[in-house]
Image: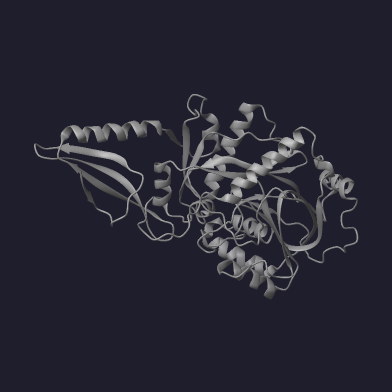
Amino acid sequence: MRQENRLKPGSGGCSVPRSHHCTPRVCFCAVHCVKRARQHRWKWAQVTFWCPEEQLCHLWLQTLREMLEKLSTCVFGLRDRMAVVARTPDQLCSSCSIVCVGGDGMFSEVLHGLIGRTQRSAGVDQNHPRAVLVPSSLRIGIIPAGSTDCVCYSTVGTSDAETSALHIVVGDSLAMDVSSVHHNSTLLRYSVSLLGYGFYGDIIKDSEKKRWLGLARYDFSGLKTFLSHHCYEGTVSFLPAQHTVGSPRDRKPCRAGCFVCRQSRQQLEEEQKKALYGLEAAEDVEEWQVVCGKFLAINATNMSCACRRSPRGLSPAAHLGDGSSDLILIRKCSRFNFLRFLIRHTNQQDQFDFTFVEVYRVKKFQFTSKHVEDEDSDLKEGGKKRFGHICSSHPSCCCAVSNSSWNCDGEVLHSPAIEVRFHCQLVRLFARGIEENLKPDSHS
């Protein structure tokens, strides 16, 4: 066999037969392949194989086709959550997949439709805060076309559309955590990236009023929110994630084939089995921790939340599938110190190395604003019974604005009292995680 390789020596990847041609003297077939480029990008290429015997050439093609038939899948392109729900069971079978083109908002719509459909089919009540959600067998593919493309950047390492398309073609699969946000035993929304109160909540709320500015609205609202410098008083109660084998400050980012995600899932499953047989303490007597005070921002990240402007993200060591979230609390501080904190999101310095910043790895948490109205205080009363107090010793916040909003993956949630739980590896994406930096044109 003679091979004419259009790539550099040593390149190659997952290949698909393209075509073949025979002449009296020689036969050849062309296959598509993937080569790695810089900054986690993938590029399309092709390789031509030459063979002097027609029978041998047909044997190659037959073998490749048989291998590809085992990997065949049905792909649907859907525009929103209603399009997912409208599909019949026969249309969305276990071998099907869903691909959407858009930003994080479009992905969130498809995600909600898929999770909701799966839970209804399994008879699971999504509004119950302690419900054990059923994972979906369908994979979701994302072709990035948004403003930040946080999900793509955090799972692939780049927001390049060609790279994401090639991950779908190759058939990669990556399990990812999902958090459910409840208020008074009602599901508000699911989240896969950022759940932010205070600074990021104010930005998204203000930017929604200025959509006519296009992408510039985020810069304008960000500057306005920074100068306003509002702080909010409340109580955060959380349950530390004892099952994880990492920590938010261990400088070990989530990568393809992540050991932390594998081990954390195994330990979480063991905890759940023990709880099922009554071998562990019930949730009501678990060691919850309570943090009270005035905060500029409260962020919970299921992933690093990296993007082009912040290549390392809000929490560089957050993991995609460990069943936990990094809870970041930024207490009241001066504008100058808060600016120093924000700048560190763009460089290699430790952004948690400030006295006014606290970070915890948690598997569930609750938040209650100081100014929650009496008729919406069911969660607050439950917190009083559990913890005995809600920071009654703290004086009222001096800020003019009493409540902020929650930024839930780019959508506004107005409820100041929420309960959040994290569901380990609930959905699967066409991705393999960010790969370690390799030399360009290395083997796929």
Asked which quadrant contains residue 55, the reply is top left
At 64% across and 61% down in the image, what residue appears? 250
Q: Where residue 69 sits in the image (x, y, percent)?
A: 37, 31
Indicate whether 172 appears above or below 303. Answer: above
Q: Position of residue 8 (x, y in %)?
A: 28, 57
Residue reaching furthest to the left: 24
Judged left or right of residue 27, residue 247 is right
Instruction: Describe residue 221's horizontal placement relative to residue 286 as left or right.
Output: left
* Along the viewing direction, whichever of 353 and 260 lies nearer the viewer: 260
Give the image location of residue 3, x and y in percent.
22, 47
Query: Which scheme is used to colour this image of the protein?
Result: one colour
Give the residue at x 69% y 73%. Answer: 337
Q: Residue furthest front?
A: 1
Assign the N terminus to one quadrant of the image.
Answer: top left
What is the residue that sits farthest to the bottom in this orientation? Answer: 336
Q: Is any atom of residue 310 visible in this view?
A: yes
Can residue 322 be spotted in the picture?
Answer: no
Q: Is residue 424 above or below residue 393?
A: above
Q: Is residue 230 above or below residue 3?
A: below
> For the image shown, how many numbered marks are present on the structure?
0
Residue 416, given in percent of the width and then of the height, sits at 76, 51
Q: At x 53% / y 29%, what residue is drawn? A: 86
The answer to which of 398 and 253 lies nearer the viewer is 253
